[in-house]
Amino acid sequence: MHIDTLAVQTLRHHEHGAVVPPVHLASTFALDPATGEGPYAYQRGGNPTRAALETVLAALDGASHGFAFATGMAATAAVFETLRSGDVVVLPTSVYGGTYRFVERLLPARGITARYVDDLSALTDDDLPERTRMVFVETPANPTLRITDLRRVAELAHRHGALLVVDNTFMTPVLQRPLELGADIVVQSATKYLGGHSDLLAGVVTTDDPALAETLALAQKAGGGVLAPQDSFRLIQSIKTLPLRLGRQQDNAVAIAAHLRSHEGIAAVLTPGSASEEEARVHAEQAAGPGAVLSFRLAPGLDRVRFLRALNLPAYAVSLGGVESLICHPATMTHEAMTPEARDRAGITDDLLRLSVGIERVDDLIADLDQALAAAR
Ligand SMILES: *Cc1c(COP(=O)(O)O)cnc(C)c1O
């Protein structure tokens, strides 16, 4: 079945003929005194509402196992539980700031070291030190929208006995299914497109590998960063409109990118594949569309703060993926933790802004951007 249908129809036939699943709030479940067993025992270990959500999450990614966490970072933390002392993780310099913080501040004490690479698309055997156990990829990269060839990196990682983990937050399974391209684990911040309304924090991990699934299930239960039943229900509900929302957001983003490219107040527009013909080809092969995040550079002479203050529609805020447009300044917000040199190398310069496009009427968004660009002169 198509993902549009799976998003709506994966869960069926609930008690009393209800067409949506119930919210089970119980923290504990009665057990059979003879065996001490039951379908569920204690909410942290599993509950019917979270299990329903996890069925949907697995279906969307075409995975055998799905896990729901309280935040995207709780999901990422569980993925790093698959590493052991002495292991090396390879990741891009421009990796999501929270992931960078986790890797820099928490992994060293566990004896796990990180090797950063500026350009994952140019990854070679020499970039993978001995004992590389994981390659962690975001494609498109944030906020440069640079593309990594997932099939190529999966093959490279596997040749070194390493796992490929893909943070698929920007694409969602609607646009890109990394497990089908060779990834071992997919992680997502469901706070972004899956939740979609900027009112819910959640994280997702999926895998097809039974041994990895066992470790992830243990990390979920023992670590305890699980998603609550009410939020599990809300995510089930939001996912039903994910393909619709993202489709509209993507159409809007494509129109805005085209408009900005011909605007004299804009020096550059960054979208997936805009960096090179090769990246455009790879993205077209591995993803079903550009998504709805774009970045742009203001032309020299335009004042960034005046531009941002003049905007009436996109709020100046971190995060992305919601129905409302948001704009942020990566150099001082999302990528502030990077060293200035690393930011420069990654192209995350002071003039770069990132726009998460919402579902508003695109003419209104374009008119707002135009008047703010005029005000920024
Ligand atoms: C937001 C985000 C995360 C972290 O998710 P939280 O839900 O905020 O914990 C991880 N990766 C990417 C790409 C993100 O955008």
Image: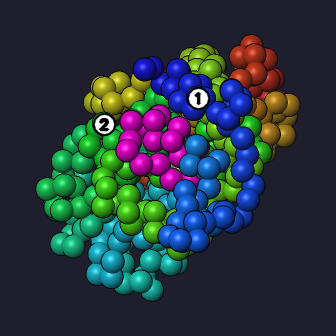
Label 2 crowding class (10 Å Cα cut-off): few <14, some 14-19, many 20+? some
Q: Position of residue 94 (x, y in %)?
A: 47, 55
Closer to the chain start, of discs 1 and 2, is 1
Label 1 crowding class (10 Å Cα cut-off): few <14, some 14-19, many 20+? few
69 magenta-colored: yes
Local secondary structure at mark 1: loop
Q: Which residue is mark 1?
A: 12
Indicate the amino acid at tag 2: Glu
Q: Which residue is mark 2?
A: 180
Residue at 62%, 55% in the rendered image = 47
Quadrant location, the N terminus: top left
Q: Nearer the viewer, residue 28 or 74?
A: 28
Q: Nearer the viewer, residue 307 or 117?
A: 117
Magenta stretch in the rendered image: 53-70
Q: Relative to 299, is 339 above or below?
A: below
- Foreground tag (1 vs 2): 1
**Which quadrant would residue 158 be assigned to in this image?**
bottom left
Q: Position of residue 60 (x, y in %)?
A: 47, 34
Quadrant location, the C terminus: top right
Indicate the amino acid at tag 1: Arg
**Which quadrant would residue 180 be assigned to in this image?**
top left
Q: Position of residue 327 (x, y in %)?
A: 71, 40
